[in-house]
Image (cartoon, grey):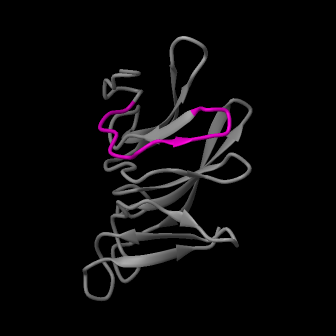
Amino acid sequence: MLYTFQNGSDGGLPFAGLIKDQLGNLYGATSSGSQGGGGTVFEMMPPGNSWKFSALYGFSGTGGPQGNLIMDQAGNLYGTTTNDGMFGQGSVFKLTPSGGDWTETDLYSFTGGSDGANPYSNIVFDANGNLYGTAYNGGANGMGVVFEITP
């Protein structure tokens, strides 16, 4: 066992899988916990004999990330939240490292209407940097959507 979540500032309920950077650091997300209750994005660094856990960012609200994160060439992390965002219907976010901290940018907040709601899915990049994923609810028939976000 590398780390046990406590559902505090570290987060809890890590539904998402892990991704690995070029240095061997692992990144993941939790769907609950943090100061704001909306989950965390975390990093696990292998500094020798034991792994070091670090909560990079905490979300507010309920229903944080459940899909895997992705990382671009610059080291920015991208993902979705299931019930966060301006309308409480989920969001697509970007986390940018800046001077030891991480800055969150909300790339899109789902409204729950024709644009969809509750993106539980992983997201992927295309060659032009566009993001694609699925949202579980909403859409014209209320049965979800496939979306594209152009950052």
User: Where on the picture, by quarter, is residue 136?
Assistant: bottom left
Residue 105 location in percent, x, y? 60, 54
**Residue closest to the far bottom:** 140
Q: Is residue 12 magenta?
A: yes
Q: Residue at x 39, y 55 (%)?
A: 84
User: Where on the picture, by quarter, is residue 141?
Assistant: bottom left
State whether the magenta stretch is mostly helix, strand or loop: loop
Q: Is residue 145 above or below residue 45?
A: below
Q: Is residue 47 above or below residue 83?
A: above
- Frontmost residue, 27 versus 94: 27
Q: Is residue 17 magenta?
A: yes
User: Is residue 58 visible in the rendered structure shown here?
Assistant: no
Query: Dividing the image into 4 quarters, which one contains the C terminus?
Result: bottom right
111 sits to left or right of 52: left
Q: Residue at x 37, y 48 (%)?
A: 64
30 sits to left or right of 103: left
Residue 48 location in percent, x, y? 60, 13
**Magenta residues, start to end:** 11-25
Q: Residue at x 72, y 52 (%)?
A: 73
- Frontmost residue, 37 versus 22: 22
Q: Is residue 66 above or below residue 133?
A: above
Residue 145 location in percent, x, y? 37, 78
75 sits to left or right of 57: right
